[in-house]
Image: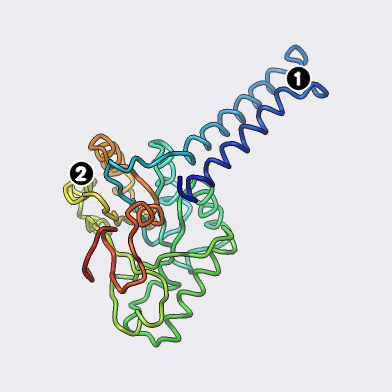
Amino acid sequence: MNRIYKMRFIIFAAISAVMLFSGCNSENPVNAETVSLTEKETMAAETTSAAETVKRLVYEVVQTKPVIALTFDDGPNTTTTAEVLDKLEKYGVPASFFVVGNNINESTAEVVKRAFDMGCEIHNHSKTHSNMTELTAGEIAEEIEFTDGKVFEITGVSTKFFRPPFIAVNNVMQEAVSLPFIAGIGANDWEDSVSADERAERIINQTKDGSIILLHDMQGNSKTVEALDTIIPKLLEDGFQFVTVSELFDTKETDTSNKFIFSNALQTSMY
């Protein structure tokens, strides 16, 4: 059991211990006859919510089954990002979000925290979503540091991976950014002319063991939200396991210190 799963097991154990203590403490017994209907409903809702959270966070990867990472770019926002999180909760799968620093504010920070608390990862997609091949090394570093700082303020965890805007990369960027570069298999889902069915079909047809799926949770991108109702169940049916980007590379024991631009954790060349 690696460190990620150990951490999730500890979370499960801690929550279980709290629930057991609350129900068995003889000094503070709960008298069901004195609890109002409203209080009973509240207690039931809190217990259900805790159980669902544990179910989402605690899972074990089967090494013999294919593993993939679902990722989203260009958030956060309070609409489409929240709808994507609803779908992830519905199917009990994690994802990784590559956020734009300038999109993080008081309102969207709550969405980022929700994703993080669900067990999703938050990574770096620059500050301004500019074409960073046109920037100096100093400007590139500032783009990364700004977004990393915003994410750390919310989650207490630094970003571990970087997705270049437009997947545009040059040597200056690779020297200025120490994080591994992530691309992915996509469906042109930023184009409104691509239907939800087309988006789903393109992703399903491309996905294989080790794949990083690249979609967008930009505001108003409802067709991608709709496509998730096809993509996730179909890939689960086909035996794929959904993990975060970090977990994908850990599971495949991939060396991320090279200059690859990863679309698959099993990649053996630059692209």
Q: Nearer the viewer, residue 104 or 124?
A: 124
- Which callout, 2 or 1, points at the residue further toward the start of the chain? 1
Q: Which of the 4 image quarters holds residue 130?
A: bottom left
Residue depicted at 32% across the width and 54% down the height:
252
Q: Quadrant of the C terminus?
A: bottom left
Q: Looking at the image, is 231 positioned above or below residue 252?
A: above
**Label 2 crowding class (10 Å Cα cut-off): few <14, some 14-19, many 20+?**
some
Q: Which mark is residue 30?
A: 1
Residue type highlighted by circle 1 = Val
Residue sitting farthest toward the front: 1
Q: How far is the residue under mark 2 from the one under mark 1?
A: 52 Å
Q: Looking at the image, is 33 positioned above or below residue 17?
A: above
Q: Which mark is residue 197?
A: 2
Residue 77 screen position, x and y as percent: 46, 56
Residue 76 appears left or right of 157: left
Residue depicted at 42% across the width and 81% down the height:
140
Q: Which of the 4 image quarters holds residue 255?
A: bottom left
Q: Looking at the image, is 182 positioned above or below residue 14?
A: below
Q: Looking at the image, is 212 positioned above or below residue 58?
A: below
